[in-house]
């Protein structure tokens, strides 16, 4: 636990400490047993590289920073242009408090850039399809608030990917002024739409 809670001093943050591996909050230590359990949530091989599974339109900034968006090309996690494997994503999912059945969504976020976007990070993720109900996501009021383990831990995994895979450090390679609290992950409630929508 002490290893994962390490901090480093960032001089450009007026010597404020910054969490080296986390979002500044306690995490679940990703032991080999916990990561193996998490990997049961996917049929992908642990050493499989995270790649684009179809052609994606990437913005100019994202393209300039290393992502081609082409099918089967590795996803470069920004801003440091690092790559990751399925096992590394599973490790992040453990740290974030996810359950194995959440891993397909965490992998989908990784395949879209892992919470990094074009290097500025943050944001929200809308889950479409039946998986949201299957894993117990909150579809009603307070979907962006605390309390629902699936909504929160999946979003937190995106933040941890940005930190660990992207190498994000405020005022060093992320110059966002205020930042944002926690990424959000919420399900689309298609069943509530009127007929023919």
Image (spheres, grey):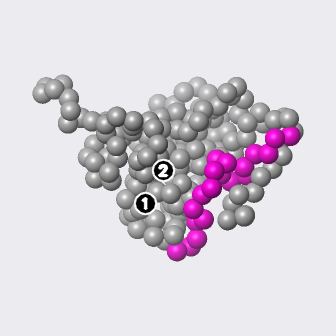
Image quarter in which the C terminus is found: top left
Q: Secondary structure at mark 1?
A: loop
Query: Pointers 1 and 2 in contact (CB under 8 A)?
Result: yes
Q: Residue at x 67, y 39 (%)?
A: 79
The vertical placement of 94 against 8, above or below, is: below
Bounds of the magenta segment: 15-33
Q: Does the image show residue 28?
A: yes
Q: In the rendered structure, which disc, 1 or 2, sits on the residue that comes first in sequence? A: 1
Q: Which mark is residue 47?
A: none
**Where residue 194 sits in the image (x, y, percent)?**
16, 26
Crowd around label 1: few <14 · some 14–19 · many ≥20 (10 Å): many
**Where residue 158 sits in the image (x, y, percent)?**
53, 45
Q: Which mark is residue 153?
A: 2
**Position of residue 132 in the picture relative to residue 19 (left or right):** left
Question: In the image as oriented, which residue stretches furthest toward the left?
Answer: 195
Crowd around label 2: few <14 · some 14–19 · many ≥20 (10 Å): many
**Where residue 98 sits in the image (x, y, percent)?**
46, 57
Q: Is residue 26 magenta?
A: yes
Q: Residue at x 41, y 62 (%)?
A: 100
Image quarter in which the N terminus is found: bottom right
**Magenta segment, principal secondary structure?**
loop
**Position of residue 197 in the picture relative to residue 77 (left or right):** left
Q: Is residue 147 magenta?
A: no
- Which residue is under mark 1? 99
């Amino acid at each position: 636990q002490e290893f994962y809670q390490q901090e480093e001093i960032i001089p450009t943050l007026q010597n404020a400490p910054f969490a080296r591996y986390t979002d500044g909050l306690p995490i679940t230590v990703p032991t080999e047993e916990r990561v193996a359990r998490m990997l049961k949530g996917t049929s992908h091989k642990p050493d499989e590289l995270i790649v684009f599974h179809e052609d994606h339109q990437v913005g100019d900034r994202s393209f300039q920073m290393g992502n081609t968006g082409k099918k089967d090309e590795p996803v470069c996690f920004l801003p440091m242009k690092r790559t990751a494997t399925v096992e590394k994503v599973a490790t992040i999912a453990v740290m974030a408090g996810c359950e194995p059945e959440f891993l397909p969504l965490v992998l989908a976020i990784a395949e879209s850039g892992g919470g990094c976007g074009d290097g500025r990070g943050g944001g929200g993720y809308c889950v479409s399809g039946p998986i949201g109900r299957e894993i117990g996501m909150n579809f009603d009021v307070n979907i962006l608030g605390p309390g629902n383990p699936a909504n929160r831990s999946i979003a937190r995994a995106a933040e941890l990917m940005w930190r660990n895979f992207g190498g994000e450090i405020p005022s060093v390679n992320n110059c966002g002024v205020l930042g944002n609290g926690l990424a959000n992950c919420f399900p689309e409630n298609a069943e509530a739409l009127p007929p023919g929508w």
